[in-house]
Amino acid sequence: MLERTGRQVERVNRALAWIELLVCQFLVAGFALLLLVNVTLRYVFSAPLYYAEETAIYMLIWMTYLAAAAAIARGDMVALTILTDKLPLRLQQGLKVVVNLLIAAMCAVLLDATITWLNAPGTAFDLALTLGLPKRPFYAIMAIFFALVCLHALAHVFLGGLRFLNGQPEPASPDLGASS
């Protein structure tokens, strides 16, 4: 029963990371297209898109958060393992579960703080300068990021706990279909 649940958790975790990377790919393509069109309009027609730079910045911010969440899902984040590599395998696995629990707890607290901030009256009236749109949708990536990382960390806790209980080794970083 737990093994089947573990496979389902792994499948959902991979699917979320795949979606995050897919959105990143669309954002990269949109970013490149936006800058190409803006440069062409600026230097060929002397009529640049006045909102291109601000839009490009928001696209980069969204890409950064989503790519970081996908990297966390894959276990590809930078880690200092000088000490933990010297520990026995079971202790390493237990420590990874504890670290992921701490990450999930931290992200849950930050998610709550971000939602409170997003719902604050001051944030509601904050407008993007050149777009003339409320910034709240652009800021929402922070809440989305903390929710995604919390889910990925909890998936790692569950899967790592199963491996710890069953004495199984850690798997290699999963392939999420992203080109290398």
Image (cartoon, grey):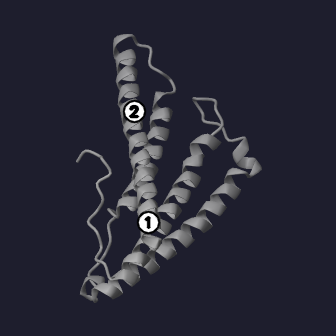
Q: Residue 8, position in %: x, y?
A: 45, 60
Towards the viewer: 82 or 172: 172
Q: Residue at x 44, y 66 (%)?
A: 4
Query: What's the CA distance linking mark 1 and mark 2?
Result: 40 Å
Towards the viewer: 14 or 38: 14
Amino acid type at mark 2 = Phe
Q: Quadrant of residue 108?
A: bottom right
Residue corresponding to mark 2: 31
Q: Residue at x 64, y 32 (%)?
A: 133
Q: Residue at x 43, y 45 (%)?
A: 19
Amino acid type at mark 1 = Arg
For marks 1 and 2, the one nearer the N-term is 1
Count all numbered tags in the image, as a single digit: 2
Describe the element under mark 2 as helix, strand or loop: helix
Describe the element under mark 1 as helix, strand or loop: helix
Q: Is residue 29 left or right of residue 51?
A: left
Q: Is residue 65 left or right of residue 117?
A: left
Task: Please rate how many residues cluster around mark 1, counting C-alpha atoms within 10 Å: few if below 14, some from 14 to 19, many from 20.
Answer: few
Q: Residue 173, position in %: x, y?
A: 28, 62
Residue corresponding to mark 1: 4
Q: Residue furthest top?
A: 45
Q: Residue 11, position in %: x, y?
A: 41, 56
